[in-house]
């Protein structure tokens, strides 16, 4: 095993572990929202605000952190974000009021907003185009696995040991991962000719906003996550209220999204990397459409085993969407703009996370979660309509010799 391969594995594993701790934290809030609401006397509307409070800090720093990571390097930005996130996670466990709880959730979002684009940039920079989707999916597996652990611990262990304990564990583990990254991952020394070549290839940041394929993939991701975050954050509550399941059963079923999502990310990532840009776009469109229909099917009067099957399929197809989007975004721009482009696209998607759970909580309080769930499924389906435009604009970009931002090399053939 050569040095480059060892570094790729180390970066992927540590970034995935950091992502896992963040996911444990966030999904614990989702699965334990009933326990938290009971302790603080929250209604569904206030619970929706609490579920979204993470995003208020998250969306502010995603794009900014991506720009800084491009200017410096991913490593120091990654470590700063992970340390900040981890300390805020620890403090979430000691919150004594709704105000302090929301503040710590916002700070957790700030830390993760700094960590995520830097970690994604680090992974992108240690991979080639032919392996990037697979490796991105392996890194991304930390998220669904953490989602499984967080959802399960919040719903099953929370009622026994208290919801606060999980935040202590996630925070301590995050600090450990940050320290490991600081000491084990070395920044490569770049030769002078490589530095000069990269400087010559740099593209002004403002050019990013004139690059139509990047803008359209960002629009797709925003629309998609406006519906998908309702699945992630309200799934345990939906299963309890609409399917009449206990908190333990609902949390365990919802946690399966993460397990099958990790498997789906790897399988679909490998399949995407065996093809070209067009294959990635086709796969992205297909799993988006099928995910929307699977989500709508959950509103039917189904037995618990069928609900479990739908949840597992939804996780298998839905969770891989983000690593595919990350891979496509990295391919659409030169290396000097990767962090900024990833940060911008992710920023758009996470902005939806700051809106849709609040809207869902408000309408669930006025009506029920079932029509909200159907509306979210329709939004997911609507997002797929943007992807054909991405392909068309990408081809146009390749044929435009004056455009300084290259699209995937496969489109040139």
Image (cartoon, helix red, strand yellow):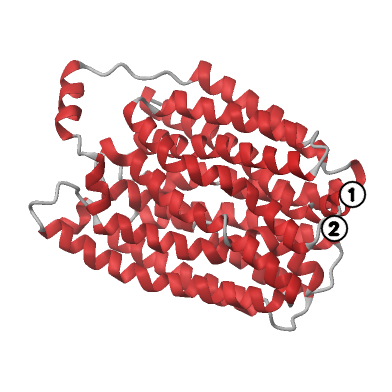
Which residue matches tag 2? 248
Query: In this picture, is 239 found above or below 6?
Result: below
| Quadrant in the picture for the N terminus | top left
Left or right, 375 with respect to 134, comes to right
Q: Position of residue 119 (x, y in %)?
A: 46, 35
Crowding around mark 2 (Cα neighbors within 10 Å: few <14, some 14 to 19, many 20+) is many
Q: Quick check: can you spot residue 265?
A: yes
Q: Nearer the viewer, residue 172 or 186?
A: 172
Q: Cβ–Cβ below 8 Å for labels 2 and 1?
A: yes
Q: Position of residue 155 (x, y in %)?
A: 81, 53
Q: Earlier in the sequence, mark 2 or mark 1?
A: 1
Q: Quick check: can you spot residue 231?
A: no
Task: Name which residue lies at 22% across and 60% down.
Answer: 394
| Alpha carbons under labels 2 and 1: distance apart | 9 Å
Left or right, 365 with respect to 88, comes to right
Task: Name which residue lies at 51% across and 72% down.
Answer: 379
Left or right, 351 with respect to 162, comes to left
Q: Which circle, 2 or 1, is nearer the viewer?
A: 1
Q: Nearer the viewer, residue 93 or 143?
A: 93
Per the rendering, the mark at residue 407 is: none
Task: Name which residue lies at 50% across and 51% down.
Answer: 266
Q: Nearer the viewer, residue 211 or 42?
A: 42
Given the current orientation, which residue lies at the most extreme right position? 160
Which type of secondary structure does the marked residue at label 2 adopt?
Answer: helix
Which residue matches tag 1? 159
């Amino acid at each position: 095993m050569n040095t480059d391969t060892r570094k790729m594995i180390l970066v992927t594993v540590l970034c995935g572990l950091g992502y896992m701790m963040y996911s444990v934290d966030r999904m614990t809030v989702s699965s334990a929202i009933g326990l938290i609401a009971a302790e603080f006397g929250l209604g569904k509307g206030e619970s929706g605000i609490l579920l979204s409070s993470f995003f208020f800090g998250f969306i502010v720093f995603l794009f900014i952190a991506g720009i800084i990571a491009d200017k410096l390097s991913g490593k120091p930005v990654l470590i700063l974000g992970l340390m900040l996130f981890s300390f805020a996670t620890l403090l979430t466990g000691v919150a004594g009021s709704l105000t302090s709880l929301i503040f710590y959730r916002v700070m957790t979002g700030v830390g993760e907003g700094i960590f995520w684009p830097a970690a994604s940039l680090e992974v992108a920079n240690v991979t080639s185009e032919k392996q990037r989707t697979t490796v991105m999916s392996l890194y991304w597996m930390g998220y669904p696995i953490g989602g499984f652990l967080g959802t399960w611990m919040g719903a099953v262990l929370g009622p026994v040991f208290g919801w606060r304990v999980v935040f202590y564990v996630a925070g301590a583990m995050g600090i450990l991962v940050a320290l490991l990254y600081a000491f084990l991952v070395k920044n490569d020394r770049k030769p002078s000719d490589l530095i000069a070549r990269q400087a010559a290839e740099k593209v002004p940041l403002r050019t990013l906003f004139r690059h139509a394929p990047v803008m359209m993939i960002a629009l797709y991701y925003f629309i998609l996550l406006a519906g998908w975050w309702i699945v992630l954050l309200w799934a345990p509550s939906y299963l309890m209220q609409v399917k009449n399941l206990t908190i333990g059963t609902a949390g365990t079923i919802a946690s399966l999204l993460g397990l099958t999502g990790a498997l789906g990310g790897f399988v679909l990532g490998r399949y995407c990397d065996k093809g070209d840009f067009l294959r990635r776009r086709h796969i992205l469109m297909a799993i988006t459409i099928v995910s929307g229909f699977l989500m709508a099917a959950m509103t039917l009067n189904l037995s618990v085993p069928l609900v479990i099957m739908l949840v597992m399929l939804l996780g298998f197809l839905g969770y891989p969407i983000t690593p595919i989007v990350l891979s496509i975004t990295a391919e659409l721009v030169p290396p000097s703009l990767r962090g900024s482009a990833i940060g911008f696209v992710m920023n758009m998607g996470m902005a939806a996370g700051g809106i849709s759970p609040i809207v869902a909580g408000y309408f669930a309080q006025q009506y029920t979660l079932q029509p909200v769930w159907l509306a979210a499924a329709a939004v997911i389906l609507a997002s797929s309509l943007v992807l054909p435009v991405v392909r068309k604009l990408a081809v146009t970009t390749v044929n435009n010799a004056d455009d300084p931002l290259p699209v995937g090399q496969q489109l040139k053939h």
